[in-house]
Structure formats: C-alpha cells, structure tokens
Amino acid sequence: MRNLKAMVNGELNVAGPVLAAALTLLVDEYRLYFRPYVLGGGKPYFAGARPPLHLIATDRIGEDVVRLTYVPT
C-alpha cells in the first residue's frame, strides 16, 4: 500500500471499515460523510482502536449530507 500511495498523484478513496482499518497508518486525512438516516446496524468505521484525530473542517453538501474532515494528530 505504501508503494501505491507513492505512485498515485492525488487522492486515494477508501470505503468501508475493514479496508480503512488496514490503512490507518497511511491516512493523511479522513473525510466522513453523514446522512441523517437510521439504518439500525452495520460495522463501526473505526472497528479497532481509533487513531487520535483533529477536526479541521465541516461542510454541508446539498440538503442532507454533512462532511467532517479530520487529520491524524
């Protein structure tokens, strides 16, 4: 994964808690998108120990989405 990150000029998008957990040490920024819907289940995004994070931005996208941007501290 480090080689992939070095080869890509720009962003790598990761979806899902399992893959995100595997890449925690390589993440420069988390952008979490929330919609106000109750699903009643699923896996937590940070399935293991959550890395220490600092909120740097909040953005409203459209009518029903909020994006929270975090960086590791």
Image: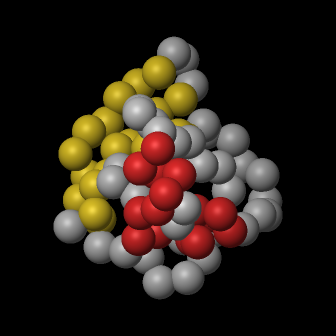
Q: As rendered, which of 24 and 52 lies closer to the eye? A: 24
Q: Quadrant of residue 28?
A: bottom left
Locate the C terminus by quadrant. Answer: bottom left
Tell me what residue is drawn at x 47 percent, y 21 percent: 61
Please determine whether, in this image, residue 12 is positioned above or below residue 60.
below
* 51 relative to 16, above or below: below
Tell me what residue is drawn at x 35 percent, y 29 percent.
59
Tell me residue 37's x, y (percent).
69, 41
Colour scheme used in the picture? secondary structure
Q: What percent of the width, then of the height, locates residue 24?
A: 46, 69
Residue farthest to the bottom?
A: 49
Q: Is residue 30 visible?
A: no
Picture coordinates of residue 15, whole percent (x, y): 65, 49
* In the image: residue 48, left or right of residue 61: right
Going by the image, does 37 lie left or right of 3? right
- Quarter of the N terminus within the rendering: bottom right
Residue 18 in sight here: yes
Q: Is residue 33 above or below residue 2?
A: above
Closer to the camera in the image, 24 or 31: 24
For image coordinates 53% across by 52% down, the residue present is 4
Which is more toward the observer, 18 or 25? 25
Task: Count all numbered tags in the image, as a single digit.
Answer: 0
Q: Residue furthest top?
A: 62
31 sits left or right of 13 in the view: left
